Image: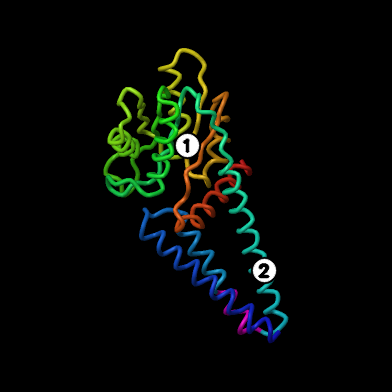
Amino acid sequence: MSRLKTVGSPLLCLLGVLVLINAAIASACSNVSLGPILTYMFGGVLLTGGILTRTLCARRARVVFIVVLCILLLAGLCIGTVYTYGRLDSVTYDEDVLIVLGAGIRWEKISLTLQRRLDTALRYYEQNPNVLIVISGGQGPQEDISEALAMERYLLCHGVPESHILKEELSTSTQENLQFSKTLLDARLNTSYTVALITNDFHIYRACTLARAQGFAHVTSAHADTPWYTVIPNGMRECLAIAASWLK
């Protein structure tokens, strides 16, 4: 028990404090969302577990430590799996359509998360300049314009012709991103077409799964890196969203 108090308790407390700091940074750098809230909760569990491990009797302290450690390991395994899968790019650079999924903006300024998606799209466009780029994202809280309009401005400023861009500005979720984008594409393109998705690595699995569910026959993907301070918040939110989709 003494070893548990001298090593295990401080370790959980330290991890809890670090996760809470991460949540605070993510909150300051992005719009209010589920990811930072889950991260605050996760940090609180770790910190509370560390305190209880220090104060409870030996038997109960071991139980608390084991439970919190299992939660930590499970969260790490789930988040690690989501990110690892998302980094396995499958694009061939000869797709007909490139769909870039939106992410939060603050007023009219794109977030670093969204900028990295757009920079990945620009790198793709350099290798396949004939591709039609669909930018998908509506207008949410703390956003003065649609995400798609902010994305269009960024691409135009970096040399992509307006004729190569198709905006989808009504969606408020990943499912709607893909559903509404397919409606626009089916109306514009008379033949079958291949699609490449661009989003951040944590988002690739669910985005590709939803794209196939919406009827896209051939889907590939290319990931954008996730800013370090959103790795845990976005990972936790995405794992919860994937679990919810499986339950459905």
Secondary structure that dominates the magenta span:
helix
- Marks 2 and 1, Cα distance to the nearest angstrom? 37 Å
Q: What is the number of the mark on residue 104?
A: none
Q: Residue at x 28, y 40 (%)?
A: 145
* Magenta run includes residue 128: no
**Looking at the rendering, in which quadrant would you find the N terminus?**
bottom right
Identify whether 187 is placed above or below 157. Answer: above
Q: Answer left or right for 84 relative to 172.
A: right
Q: Which residues are magenta?
A: 48-56
Tell which circle, 2 or 1, labels the residue nearer the N-terminal end: 2
Q: Residue at x 41, y 31 (%)?
A: 126
Secondary structure of residue under mark 1: strand
* Magenta run includes residue 49: yes
Q: Using a 10 Å C-alpha cutoff, classify the residue at mark 2 as few (fewer than 14 neighbours), some (14 to 19) or many (20 or more).
A: few
Q: Which residue is mark 1?
A: 198
Identify whether 166 is placed above or below 81. Answer: above
Q: Which residue is mark 2?
A: 67
**Looking at the rendering, in which quadrant would you find the C terminus?**
top right
Examine the image and state in which quarter residue 91 appears: top right
Examine the image and state in which quarter residue 154 appears: top left
In front of the other: 145 or 10? 10
The disc labelled 2 sits on which kind of residue? Val
Secondary structure of residue under mark 2: helix
